[in-house]
Amino acid sequence: MNFPEPGDYIDIHNHGAEPAPGVFTVDTLMAHEERVPENIKGLTFSFGIHPWYLDEKNHGELIDRVIKNAGNPDIAAIGEAGFDRLKGPSPELQTKTFEEQVLIAEEKKKPLVIHCVRAWDDLLREYKRLRPKMPWLVHGFRGKPDLAQQLVSKGIYLSFWFDFVMRPESVPLLKSVPKERIFLETDGAEIDIKGIYNKVSIDLGLTVEGLKTIIYKNFNVFFAPKSRQSGTYEVRMQNNRITK
């Protein structure tokens, strides 16, 4: 996988990103799409099944695509996987598919990127039950500080929803999260990641360069090779199906 350079602005979650000077982006590839990872300077990729595009008919095909692509060195993370109580299939299918992607991430020793909407009890239950070794990142977070503390207490990283983080009311949340657990993102929106850094650095009493240094360190810990030395699962692929 590609890594950012010191001093880069890091956009941890985007869709359809193009290389840009001074910006390093994790571009999200979704299993229902035809896009495939490439070795492009300034980019790395995640790959997974978003719950919005999952149903009983395509579940097997999408899991097969994740299994097929998960070992690609240009894919740095699995996801975005997760739960959505406003859009998507049944909670049972979402849970099954989330667990399968956790197992793939553990087997490939890659971190997991998570989409979660109004399903925090489900996410925390799965974390407790599955006990992953690979780190998890919740993207698009805009919850209360108490919820943020529950998540970071498990070692989970948070990337803040681009629109919310630009509002004044985001400041209490930003200040409540340990700096070693934060990331910033654009999520494919027409917004400049540099503007997000400018606003958040002011909120946190930092220089932009100081904030870039913090997030650069977070990136290297989140994707650190040393975190990939051991996993909790023995995962076998039998006829392209997952077994434990």
Image (tube, rainbow, N blue to C red):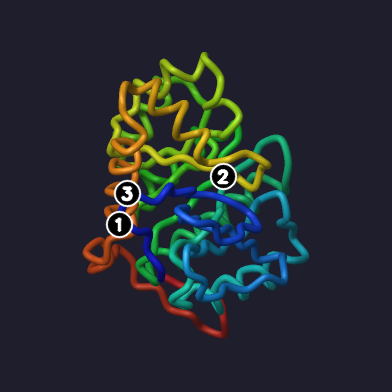
Residue 20: % across, % down? 54, 57
Residue 76: % across, % down? 44, 65
Residue 244: % across, % down? 41, 70
Residue for point 21% across, 64% down: 226
Query: Furthest-right residue in view?
Result: 57
Please name which of the two marks, 1 or 2, marks the residue nearer to the observer.
2
Q: Residues within 10 Å of mark 3 (few under 14, many from 20)?
A: many
The type of residue carrying mark 2 is His
Decide which of tag 1 and tag 2 comes sooner along the chain.
2
Query: Is 32 situated above or below 117?
Result: below
Q: Nearer the viewer, residue 105 or 14?
A: 14
Query: Is 54 situated above or below 84?
Result: below
User: Helix, strand or loop at disc 1?
Assistant: loop
Residue placed under numbered mark 3 in the picture: 216
Q: Residues within 10 Å of mark 1 (few under 14, many from 20)?
A: some
What label sits on residue 133 in the rendered view? 1
Query: Is 2 situated above or below 6?
Result: below
Residue placed under numbered mark 2 in the picture: 115
Asked if residue 117 lies left or right of residue 205, the reply is right
The type of residue carrying mark 3 is Tyr
